[in-house]
Image (cartoon, rainbow, N blue to C red):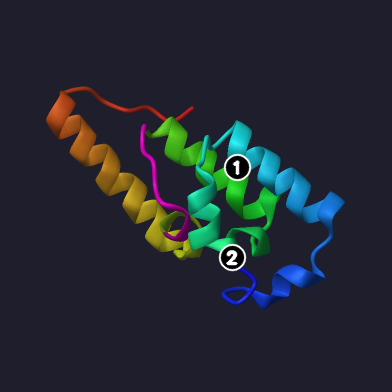
Amino acid sequence: MALRCPGLFTYSIENNFKPKFEYFIEQINGELEELKEFPQYFAFSLEKRIKPRHLEAVRSGLRFDLPTMLKTTDEEFIELIKRGRGFLEHVFGFMFYST
């Protein structure tokens, strides 16, 4: 993990790793293998990037891998949400409404 994201050594355990790890396990229901494959997860802001995008994906009935959810631009992420909703509406025949 450290080879893929050497900045990990500079992050605070209490202020960075712990809250992000807890959110990943408890809310995202992620697998540890995902963090090993994408340690850059810890470089993203929990409040400004991780939570908002995860919650929007959940509201839309979608699940993305971590790199897709976090590395895409805001515009790309919005487009992924729109396309995902459209696909689900087509397949399952119901509409999604944002709250």
Secondary structure found at label 2: helix
Residue closer to the observer: 40 or 89: 40
Residue for badge 1: 24
Q: Quadrant of residue 24?
A: top right
In the figure, residue 25 lies in which quadrant?
A: top right
Report whether 24 appears left or right of 77: right
Residue lying at 49% horizontally and 51% vertically, measured from the top left: 33
Q: Image check: 16 left or right of 5?
A: right
Q: Amino acid at mark 1?
A: Phe
| Residue 40 circle label | 2
Judging depth in this view, the residue of 24 and 87 nearest the camera is 24
State the extent of the magenta-drawn residues as a range.
Answer: 61-67
> Which residue is drawn at the image coordinates 26% and 48% (left, top)?
83
Q: Residue at x 64, y 60 (%)?
A: 44
Q: Earlier in the sequence, mark 1 or mark 2?
A: 1
Residue 39, image x, y percentages: 58, 63
Horizontal side of residue 57 vs 53, given as left or right? left
